[in-house]
Image (cartoon, helix red, strand yellow):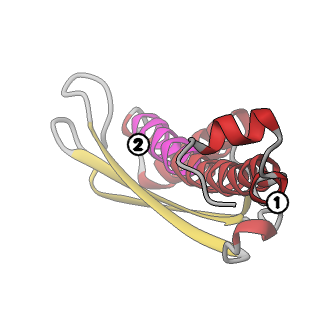
Amino acid sequence: MITDRPLAELCQDNLDRHRCDADRGSIEVEFALGMIVLLVLLMLATGVHRVVDAEADLQTAASAAARAASRQSGPSAAGSAALDAAMANLTQGTTTCGSIDVDTATGRLEPGGSVTVTVRCTVDYSDLVLISTPGRRHFRSTATAVVDRFRGGT
């Protein structure tokens, strides 16, 4: 039966039951698809957050290591101070490094000079399997600190 009445009226009056039944369950399908999209976005946001957090933790550790190294009077003391500061800083952060490497450039460790520290860290992301992240990611951060004219240096 063909009629000029809107579909909503037909469904309310139950005059055209076949056309009304075709729409049944569509809201559940839309909801399920929407939830899948939301879950994928949530997993991607989690992965991005973990990468940004690791980069920030590593930059903070490199800055702390460079400051600690610039306060020392010799290259070996600067290297061990940088390593200790980087390790202490990374253990306080939220990033868990599988391996940590700290390089200290002390060629200008003199009053008014500078010390450059590079911190490398390998972070394991294998627990984020649902968004297909690589198992490990290597991060690198470099910071430079000026040696105080009246305090450090050889």
Q: Residue at x 23, y 43 (%)?
A: 110
Closer to the chain start, of discs 2 and 1, is 1
Is residue 88 visible in the rendered image? The answer is: no
Badge number at residue 102 = none
Q: Residue at x 77, y 33 (%)?
A: 12
The quadrant in which residue 101 appears is bottom right
Q: Residues within 10 Å of mark 1 (few under 14, many from 20)?
A: few
Helix, strand or loop: magenta stretch: helix
Residue 119 pos. (x, y %): 50, 58
Q: Nearer the viewer, residue 50 or 101?
A: 50
Measured in 3D between alpha carbons, the distance from the residue under mark 2 to the one under mark 1, in whole angstroms, is 75 Å
Is residue 131 visible in the rendered image? The answer is: yes
- Foreground disc of the pair 2, 1: 1
Image position of 76 (left or right of 25): left
Residue 56 pos. (x, y %): 49, 42
Going by the numbered disc 2, the residue's amino acid type is: Ala
Screen quadrant of the N terminus: bottom right
| Highlighted range, magenta | 53-68
Screen quadrant of the C terminus: top left
Badge number at residue 66 = 2
Q: Nearer the viewer, residue 6 or 147?
A: 6
Going by the numbered disc 1, the residue's amino acid type is: His
Does the CB distance between marks 2 and 1 fall below 8 Å? Answer: no
Image position of 23 (left or right of 143): right
Residue 71 pos. (x, y %): 40, 32
Q: Residue at x 83, y 63 (%)?
A: 127
Q: Magenta segment: does it hold 2?
A: no
Residue 69 pos. (x, y %): 44, 42
Classify mark 2: helix, strand or loop.
Answer: helix
Q: Nearer the viewer, residue 146 or 49?
A: 49
| For residue 143, above or below residue 97 | above
> Which residue is labeled 1 in the image?
18
